[in-house]
Amino acid sequence: MSGTHSTARRRLHIGLAALLLALFCLLINPLSALACGGLFSKDLHAEQTGERLIYALDEGKVTLYEQFTYTGSPKDFVWVLPVPAVPTIDVASVDLFRELDRDTVPSFYVNRHEAPPCFPTNRENSAGSAAPTGGSAVHVYSGGGIGPYSYNVIGSNDPQALTQWLDGHQYKLSEEERAELKPYIAAKMLFLVMRLQGNAGVQDIAPVKITYATKQASFSIPLRLAAPMGKLPLGVTVWIFGKSRYVPQNYQSLELTSSDFRNVTNPWSNFYDGKVEQKVKQAGGHAFVTEYAQNFQSMQPQDPQLRSLQQHYGYLTRLYTRISANQIQRDPTFVAQTGLSDVSRYHAITMPETNEQNCTGEYLLVGGALLLGIGIIAVPIVLFVRRRRKHII
């Protein structure tokens, strides 16, 4: 009887200890989620419809790296890029964009003496020939395959001839996209057209590297071709490697300051994109925010292509915009500008002072509720143990 009694008591104690441990975990987890302050960062643009482009600029030459986001059928994938000269084409690594984004993405911190939000929202943390000068035929300047892609570089002064050539070579474009080609044809641009080849699937899509000759000191992004792609705001992130800081020439150049982050009640939500959209709308829909502008030599990238860019170029500018499709009426042009100050990726967030009192009240409310729950569960257990003991005696 004594052995049975001892075993029963041991099982009861183990069960009680497990219950208390579970309740303890419930108690500490909400409080740890309420921890105040700290440094956090998030790529704001992952999983959104947008464009991510890297430009590396030398005298007489531009190198463009572009990353695609595409979820449709492989046979429907078509990419068209206006270029001023016949380019050389290669594939790039996804790590190039991943590391560059990680090292330059805007990051936010709350000073410990400032009031933090009480319940932050969790967040997943080479030179070529020029364009044709006459005639209505379609000129094919180069073509082939690289990585998962097949491509051609074509040119024509006749929009109808060019679209007929695209149709005949299985490059299917919508009527809106065809219309968007006309200004570039009038400007005597060439077109790099690309699609997935063979059995390549969407999972094989890789960033591309395109190098072409130019006589211009500035460069433009053919953003108008992106306008028909959707009705939601288009997020555009541009990194520019050069000798100095770059700014938009025909769009407004904006910066977010500490005043833009005052009285932020929930910095873990999508407040940043909202702030950028607000700023861009105030500028008439044509503006870029400079998110980062500094010497990039202090970084230690692992990707070979990013290391090469770091070694060759002294300065890096990162710009971002969110622009509605109906506002994409002209292609943004960027130019180097000296004498401008650096722009840090880090921003201090100022919280409302009343949050500290609110947090204290919520701490007490949560703690009191959990202690009450422990008491409600523990009292019957204690009474049961006492009755059991009296019965055994």
Image (cartoon, rainbow, N blue to C red):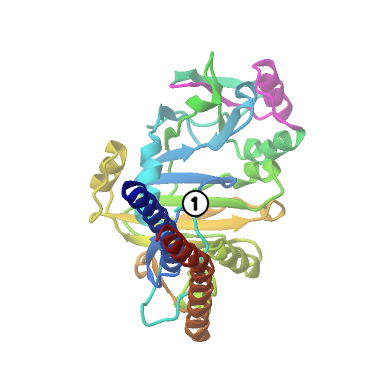
| Relative horizontal placement of residue 132, taking residue 179 as reference (left or right) | left
**Residue plotted at (70% across, 29% down):** 173
In the depicted view, which residue is nearer to us: 45 or 282? 45
Q: Is residue 159 magenta?
A: yes
Residue occupying image coordinates x 55% and y 26% = 202
Whether 367 is drawn above or below 80: the answer is below
Q: Please tell me whether mark 1 sits on a helix, a strand or a loop.
A: strand
> Residue 41's spot in the image, x, y percent?
41, 59
Residue 198 in magenta?
no
Q: Label 1: few (<14), some or many (≥20) within 10 Å?
A: many
Res 393 seen here: yes
Let me know if residue 136 appears in the view: no
Query: Would residue 161 appear left or right of 372 to someone viewing this image?
Result: right
199 w.r.t. 278: above or below: above
- State the residue at coordinates (54%, 46%): 221
User: What's under tag 1, amino acid-wise?
Assistant: Thr
**Farthest residue in the right direction?**
175
Q: Quadrant of residue 94?
A: top left
Q: Nearer the viewer, residue 203 or 317?
A: 203
Counting from the top left corner in percent of width and height, residue 253 is at 51, 65
Q: Which residues are magenta?
A: 147-174
The residue lying toward the viewer, choosing from 77 and 203, is: 203
Q: Is residue 81 above or below residue 167?
A: below
Q: Which residue is mark 1?
A: 237
Foreground residue among 43 and 286: 43
Q: Percent x, y for residue 343?
A: 37, 67
Q: What's the residue at 52%, 53% (across, down)? A: 333
Image quadrant holding the C terminus, namely bottom left
